Image: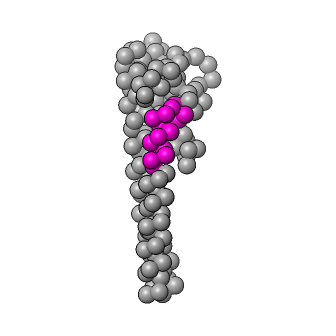
Amino acid sequence: MNLHLKRLLLLVVVVIMAVFIGGCSNEKVGVVDGSKISDTPKIQEMQKDLQAKLDEKAKELSTQLEQEKANLSPEDYQKRYVSLRTEFNTLQESYQKDILNAVNEAISAVAKEKSISTVLYKDAVVHGGIDITDDVVKKLQ
């Protein structure tokens, strides 16, 4: 899940910044280390809370499905399983968006303070950029 969140963060930032990067030759470009941001206490705590909520929901849905199993045909059972799995995945995505929003808010605040118009993850940059990772980490504390 942690890898999924990192990939999601990277994809969102790269797509958004790719739109703005064209024609921005005099603009400041910032870079952040996604791994370092993911390791901050606030993000770690959010991920821990997320996992606890997801574990609780998984148990709840599993219990619900087991209780319904006796009354369902194999086809209906499979449909119900898919329905509950979709519900679980939707909840997981919602929680991950909360984490992503917290990170994006911190990045945006630091970028604004430093008059940086574009921020990319270090993994997407071969050379250059102003590293604002430490400032983002401080914002997240």
Q: Which of 105 and 70 is in front in this view?
A: 70
Q: Which of 14 and 55 is in front in this view?
A: 55
Name the spot of residue 29 as percent of width and height, x first.
48, 19
Residue 64 location, quadrant: bottom left
Q: In this view, does 141 lie above or below 28?
A: below
Please name the residue shown 44% across and 15% down the image: 27
Residue 39 included in the magenta stretch of the image: yes
* Principal secondary structure, stretch drawn in magenta: helix
Query: Compared to 56, does 16 lie above or below?
Result: above
Residue found farthest to the right: 126
Residue drawn at point x = 40 percent, y = 21 percent? 110
Q: Is residue 83 visible?
A: yes
Residue segment shown in magenta: 37-50
- Is residue 16 on the magenta stretch? no
In the rendered image, residue 47, in percent from the top left (x then y), is placed at 48, 44
- Using the rendered view, name the quadrant where residue 83 is placed: bottom left
Q: Residue at coordinates 44% horizontally, 80% vertically from top-left? A: 67
Residue positioned 56% across, 44% down in the render: 2
Please identify the quadrant where the C terminus is shown. Answer: top left
Give the x, y percent position of residue 24.
45, 18
**Does residue 107 appear in this view?**
no
